[in-house]
Amino acid sequence: RGIIDFFQANTRGDIPIALTDPQGPFTNASLLWQTDEFFTACYTHPKQVHHIMNILTDSFIEYTDAQLKLIDNPAFPGHSFPLGETGRGISLSDDNSVMISPAMFEEFNLPYLNRISEHYNGIYYHSCGNYMKVLPSIMKIKKLRAVNYHTGPYEMVSRQARKIINGKCAVWSSYSIESVGWRGNMPPIETVFKDYYIPQNLEHGKRGIILAGMGSYQGSEGLDIEAHQRQIDWVRQQIAEYQKTN
């Protein structure tokens, strides 16, 4: 509460304030219940798993409602997504989805994501890693507004993901960081955009790409605005050249 109060007092509500980056109930359960034992219990003690999932879903909604009550000018949907429309959902992270089967996702995760989505009029869904195997199940979330993933050879392959999404919701993707999506062998960023990121994200239709600065957790100190603008101009040029020939 102290951080929300501080920024509201010093910005007079002129700058929208986002909610925290919340993990969904399924991931939170594995933080309270040792992860391997929790996953095993999905097979051996499903009733107990549903019990804790109900409790954690109630807690998620209670905590999120409490934040929204404190914020005069909330920024929707929140972390990992561009600013959206008021009253159309919140964002959440669900990073454990990469480790479970579609059947487990649909039994122990989907019903509770649906409860959250119904309460907030939609969900913007994020997970790190390669969650392709459960993506068809994610598409079953009621009022799913968008999905966010990292595009890289060892994370989500956009051309495959977009075939599954097929216009059912918006897509917000970024290229993977070197240590995860490229396993330490990331090529120059120009090569990533020109030969990998742009073709993969425009392959299934010319509906455009939103370019957004990724920022950093260190803030804007030392940011070279002119260099940043040159990078954006270069990427726009590469997109235009790709669209001319594809």
Image (tube, rainbow, N blue to C red):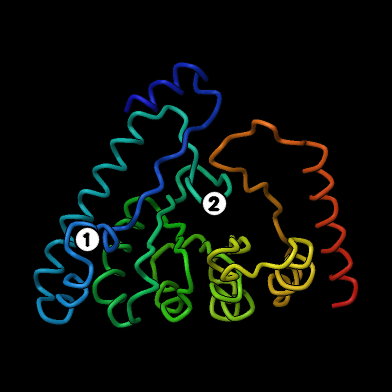
Q: Position of residue 233 (x, y in %)?
A: 84, 50
Q: Position of residue 140 (x, y in %)?
A: 40, 73
- In the rendered image of this protein, does residue 240 appear above or below residue 2? below
- What residue is shown with label 1? 29
Front residue of 50/180: it is 180
Residue type indicated by callout 1? Ala
**In the picture provided, is 66 more to the left or to the right than 166?**
left
> What residue lies at 55% left-to-right and 47% top-to-bottom?
84
- In the rendered image of this protein, does residue 8 appear above or below residue 145? above
Front residue of 40/239: it is 40
Quarter occupied by residue 70: top left
Q: Position of residue 42 (x, y in %)?
A: 18, 76
Front residue of 52/71: it is 52
Query: Which quadrant of the rendered structure holds the C terminus?
Result: bottom right
On residue 12, the disc is none
**In the picture provided, is 25 more to the left or to the right than 3?**
left
**In the picture provided, is 235 more to the left or to the right than 119?**
right
Label 1 element class: helix
Few, some or many C-alpha atoms within 10 Å of disc 2 (few <14, some 14-19, many ≥20)? Answer: some
Quarter occupied by residue 154: bottom right
Q: Position of residue 49 (x, y in %)?
A: 15, 69
Label 2 element class: loop
- What residue is shown with label 2? 81
> What residue lies at 46% left-to-right and 35% top-to-bottom?
74
**In the picture provided, is 202 more to the left or to the right than 52?**
right
Question: Which sits earlier in the primary sequence, circle 1 or circle 2?
Answer: 1
